[in-house]
Image (cartoon, rainbow, N blue to C red):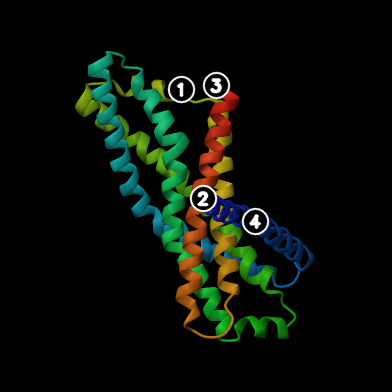
């Protein structure tokens, strides 16, 4: 039993150390970009725009489908609870608690890990294997400023946008489902949702998205650039990036939610 606890404690400490490594990587990336910001700024902004297009715009259809199904599930649950408790205000409470606080920040993050996290890790690993990273060094360009920083900025912006769109889609279709299945007035449904929203909800929403975006694109870049010898390592670094991103994003979301409920509700 003691050995199991010791091994578990070591793994957890190693997991927490990943946050420290990520923060150092973030600091170095921002510092190097700021130092080299006048060198090839147009190229960097082009990479940021491409990252936003591939990460954000191309993921919109999937986010739309997820938001519709989530809003349907929450509406059905609200109808069930309303029939049981007779309280129509539960609809706004459920949408605020489930959609805005939790699902709209977590599902887009997991989607980005599956789509963009894997792509960034494998792309950077391939670039390192093909000596493209060395070529940047030979031209006096730091890989952090040209490769990592644009993907980080574009990724965080994309995740924020996708989460906002998720909420919009969920509210729009939630109102449609509420009208169809619950006979609820549109303005009453909207008022319920916005009545439940607190300033803390907005703060936690942005904190979760920014932290998740940083985790996904910093960890994926870090793992991709960690490739050493051969192409056989590419699947390994990609898998490691996905595993670390999922565990760190989930832990961060849980921690933010616990702190939020502790501060707001005591």
Q: Is residue 251 left or right of residue 184?
A: right
Give the CA separation, mark 2 to mark 4: 15 Å
Q: Earlier in the sequence, mark 3 or mark 2?
A: 2
Q: Which residue is mark 3?
A: 265
Cα–Cα gap, marks 3 and 2:
24 Å
* Residue 88 x, y percent position in the rendering: 31, 16
Where residue 135 sits in the image (x, y, percent)? 66, 85
Locate the C terminus by quadrant: top right
Q: Is residue 127 placed above or below 244 in the rendered structure?
A: below
* Residue contact between numbered discs 2 and 4, judged by CB atoms under 8 Å: no
Near mark 4 (Cα within 10 A), the count class, few <14, some 14-19 or many ≥20, is few
Q: Report the mark closest to the observer, 4 or 3.
A: 4
Does the residue at mark 3 contact the one at mark 1 (Cβ under 8 Å)? no
Which label belongs to residue 68?
Answer: none
On screen, residue 187 above or below 225: above
Residue for badge 4: 17
Earlier in the chain: of badge 4 and badge 3, it is 4
At numbered mark 3, what does the secondary structure look like: helix, strand or loop? helix
| Image depth: mark 2 or mark 1 in front | 2
Q: CA distance from mark 4 to mark 3?
A: 30 Å
Residue 24 horizontal/vertical position (percent): 71, 59
| Residue at (27% x, 32% y) in the render | 176
Q: Residue at x 37, y 50 (%)?
A: 63
Neighbours of disc 3 within 10 Å: few (<14), some (14-19), many (20+): few
Circle 2 is placed at which residue position? 249
The residue indicated by pointer 1 is 196
Secondary structure state at the residue bearing disc 2: helix
**Of the residues tagged 1 and 4, which is closer to the observer?**
4
Q: Secondary structure at mark 4?
A: helix
């Amino acid at each position: 039993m003691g050995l199991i606890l010791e091994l578990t404690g070591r793994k957890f400490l190693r997991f927490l150390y990943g946050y420290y490594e990520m923060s150092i990587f973030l600091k170095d990336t921002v510092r190097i970009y700021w130092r080299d910001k006048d060198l090839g700024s147009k190229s960097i902004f082009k990479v940021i725009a491409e990252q936003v297009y591939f990460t954000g715009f191309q993921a919109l259809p999937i986010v739309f489908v997820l938001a519709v199904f989530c809003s349907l599930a929450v509406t059905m649950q609200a109808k069930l609870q309303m029939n049981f408790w007779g309280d129509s205000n539960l609809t706004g409470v459920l949408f605020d608690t489930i959609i805005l606080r939790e699902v709209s920040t977590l599902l887009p993050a997991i989607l980005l890990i599956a789509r963009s996290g894997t792509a960034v890790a494998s792309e950077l690993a391939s670039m390192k294997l093909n000596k493209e990273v060395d070529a940047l060094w030979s031209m006096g360009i730091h890989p952090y400023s040209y490769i990592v920083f644009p993907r980080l900025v574009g990724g965080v912006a994309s995740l924020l946008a996708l989460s906002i769109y998720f909420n919009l889609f969920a509210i729009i279709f939630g109102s449609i489902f509420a009208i169809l299945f619950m006979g609820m007035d549109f303005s009453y449904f909207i008022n319920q949702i916005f009545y439940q929203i607190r300033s803390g909800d907005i703060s936690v929403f942005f904190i979760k998205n920014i932290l998740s975006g940083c985790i996904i694109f910093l960890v994926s870049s870090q793992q991709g650039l960690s490739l050493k010898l051969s192409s056989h390592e590419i699947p390994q670094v990609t898998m490691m990036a996905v595993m670390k991103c999922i565990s760190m994003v989930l832990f961060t979301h849980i921690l933010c939610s616990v702190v939020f409920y502790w501060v707001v509700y005591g």
